[in-house]
Amino acid sequence: MKVEKLAIVVTVCLISLGLLVGPAAGQAPSLDKWKPAFDPSGAKYKCVVSNVSHPVLKGVYAGFAIRDELWKRTNGQIYLDFKPFSMLGGEVEVLNQLQMGAIQGMGCSSVAATNLGPRFGLVNLPFLIDSFDKLDKFVGSGKLFEHFMMAMDHQGIIGLDITGYGNYGWATINPVRNLEDAKKVKFRTAEAAVNQLLYQEWGFNPVAMPWPDVPIALKQGVITGLDHTPSVCNITKKFEDAKYFTYVNYAQGLFLWIFNKAWFNSLPADLQKTFREVVRDVCAKIRNETVEQEFEQIELAKKAGIEFITLPEADIATLRKKGNAVHDKYAPEINKLSPGDTYRPANFLEEVKGYVGYKP
């Protein structure tokens, strides 16, 4: 009897701490809304693709759009089984699954992608590619963008294209109106080298944390702010706890559509070509829709009572100045070349800076 009572007490404690997941703590997300309008059982090739976030986000929904277009253009030969909502785990562990070939693809956030492809950290550098217009310019740069997408090639992973999820800022429990306010916040950041380095240079308090752990951490005060975008915060209901958003717009949030190279190369040449074309075409369309979605989500959040704050220009100037140190410190990782690189620039980062018009 004592053992049974002890078990009950332990169970209650685990639930209260948010450590026990099940019907009492919430159901797993359903994909019923996004079921394919076809029977995938006859597909010759199957591709399991992961993403951590919500498919209401245009940049995430791209996975379903790619699935449907692939089915159409390959006449039902390829079925892309898309798993959003962190169904397969956090990004670091899923990247390992992808590299080992346990899954075939991933819509990986640019912040987490640096774990296997440091060159991907380029887009996380502060105030470098910090607007939708600059992102479009970079995607259209030809050899520069192609070299960027080769960041994981040496790890057995190919990158095909990108979608986005908006401009990074700060969603916080208490209002952040200046840098002194920001220093009091425990900011959740991704488990990524560039982000940790940036927040240290800024003099803030970063807490590296997998995305699936964020809701409970926010409610329990383990973190008091998020380094993220308005669309993500509104759609994934982070504004229920963090009711203030401070514009910083220091980087674009991206999903990199990456695939296991061995699996991709196992496809017939004509299907490889179609696969590339589908990902490229869908991503281009989705990037345009992402611009509209950010505006819509900000307006919806404002109507729901979320306050959006603009930092003083002097504070933004300070963030830019301190951020330059991150450019310098991370440059060797971004400029490092791998055996498979066909474009071999002497200083990739400086070429990109010149192309997008970055000014320190």
Image (spheres, helix red, strand yellow):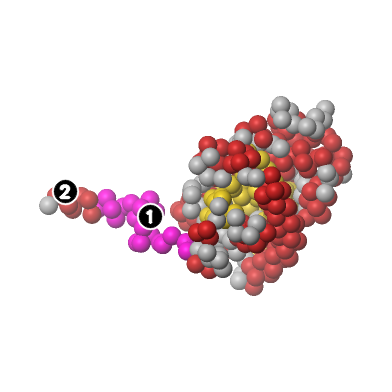
* Secondary structure at numbered mark 1: loop
Pointer 1 residue? 21
Would you say 287 lies left or right of 214 here?
right
Residue 121 lies in what quarter of the image? top right
* Pick the front one: 197 or 51: 51
User: Horizontal and vertical percent for residue 46?
Assistant: 55, 51
C-alpha separation, residue under disc 1 versus residue under disc 2: 22 Å
User: Horizontal and vertical percent for residue 256?
Assistant: 66, 47
| Residue 108 visible in rendering | yes
Residue 306 lies in what quarter of the image? bottom right
Q: Residue at (50%, 67%) from the top-left corner?
A: 32
Residue 331 lies in what quarter of the image? top right
What segment is highlighted magenta in the picture?
9-30
User: Horizontal and vertical percent for residue 294?
Assistant: 70, 63
Q: Residue at (77%, 41%) from the top-left corner?
A: 146
Pointer 2 residue? 3
Name which residue type carries label 2: Val
Mark with earlier residue (1, 2): 2
Question: Magenta region, mostly helix, strand or loop?
Answer: loop
* Pick the front one: 4 or 78: 78
| Residue 175 visible in rendering | no
